[in-house]
Image (spheres, grey):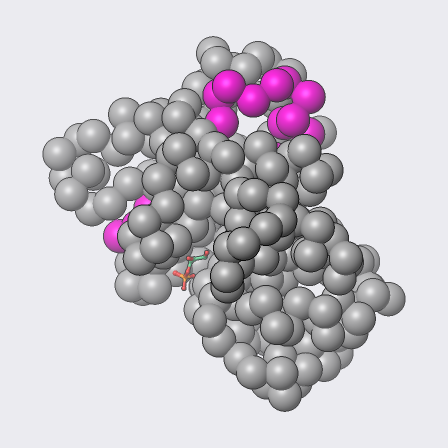
Amino acid sequence: MREKIVAGNWKMNNDLAETEELISKLKLQMVKEPEAKVMVAPGFPNLYPTFQALKDTPVIVAAQNMHENESGAYTGEVSAAMLKSVGVTTVILGHSERRAYFHEDSAILKKKVLTAINNDMTVIFCFGEELEDRKNDKHFDLVEKQLKEALFDLPKSAWKNIILAYEPVWAIGTGETASPEQAQEMHKHIRTLLDKNVGKEVADSTSILYGGSVKPNNAKEIFAKEDVDGGLIGGASLNAVDFVAIVNSF
Ligand code: 13P
């Protein structure tokens, strides 16, 4: 059974006090047992306080990035072991902002995913086309390439720890959303690729999230599509009322 998941990617927003305030509001707004699995991804310094504050709730705390090596002389980087030591066992990898601004390509992402899996972590793997790719009708091929290069060599057993997040770059932070039909079309394509390259069991059981300007007023329609299993939420996850409305949109 595919899990319904709503994950909030807080990106580089909120200091400690703001993080604590957002968590308090979330705890007030959210029902005790939401229908979807809920995750939030604060910045590195706020991971431990967030984990502590949400310990008594079903909300899972995720990191936004992680280094591909286990440890060593990599100034400024964070390892899987460091994350796990503060209670974080889920990590977002491959976000388009990491790809665009920090030059993370498929080769690096493949290593990062493998390191996360070897450390028994769950990965939210992001990918998606740019506007130019869609205009040139290359979006299906591009997504196939991104998945193939980073994920399709993984052992089948790794897939129980992988959540996919399709995030068309043109829809991130722009207020422009893929239509529910465009999301469904791509998610179906992704599931077909999983079936062909990994197997039916994995295709049927992997959650595929949509990300890109999901708001309370469009979440329901997008989440209602057959192959959309939830969302990865940026801007709207910084507002507790909006985020909880999205969590409740199934
Ligand atoms: P927005 O919801 O702000 O468009 O961001 C989506 C995103 O990048 C989530 O990772």
The answer to whether residue 49 is left or right of residue 187 is right
- Which residue sits at x=72%, y=81%? 24
- Which residue sits at x=45%, y=38%? 109
Residue 87: percent from left, percent from top: 77, 58
Residue 60: percent from left, percent from top: 72, 57
In this view, the residue farthest toward the bottom is 17
Ligand 1, what quadrant?
Answer: bottom left
The answer to whether residue 81 is left or right of residue 72 is right
Magenta-span inclusion, residue 158 = yes
Q: How many marks?
A: 0
Residue 51: percent from left, percent from top: 75, 66
Query: Vertical placement of 88 versus 230: above or below?
Result: below
- Which residue sits at x=75%, y=62%? 86
Residue 227 visible in the current orientation: yes
Query: Vertical placement of 241 versus 85: above or below?
Result: below
In this view, the residue farthest toward the front is 73
**Camera-side residue of 80 and 89:** 80
Name the quadrant of the N terminus: top right
Q: Which residues are magenta?
A: 151-170
Residue 181 visible in the current orientation: no
Q: Which picture quadrant has residue 118? A: top right
- Which residue sits at x=20%, y=30%? 138
**Camera-side residue of 135 and 71:** 71
In this view, the residue farthest toward the right is 56
Residue 69: percent from left, percent from top: 56, 43
Query: Vertical placement of 169 versus 22: above or below?
Result: above
The answer to whether residue 17 is left or right of residue 52 is left
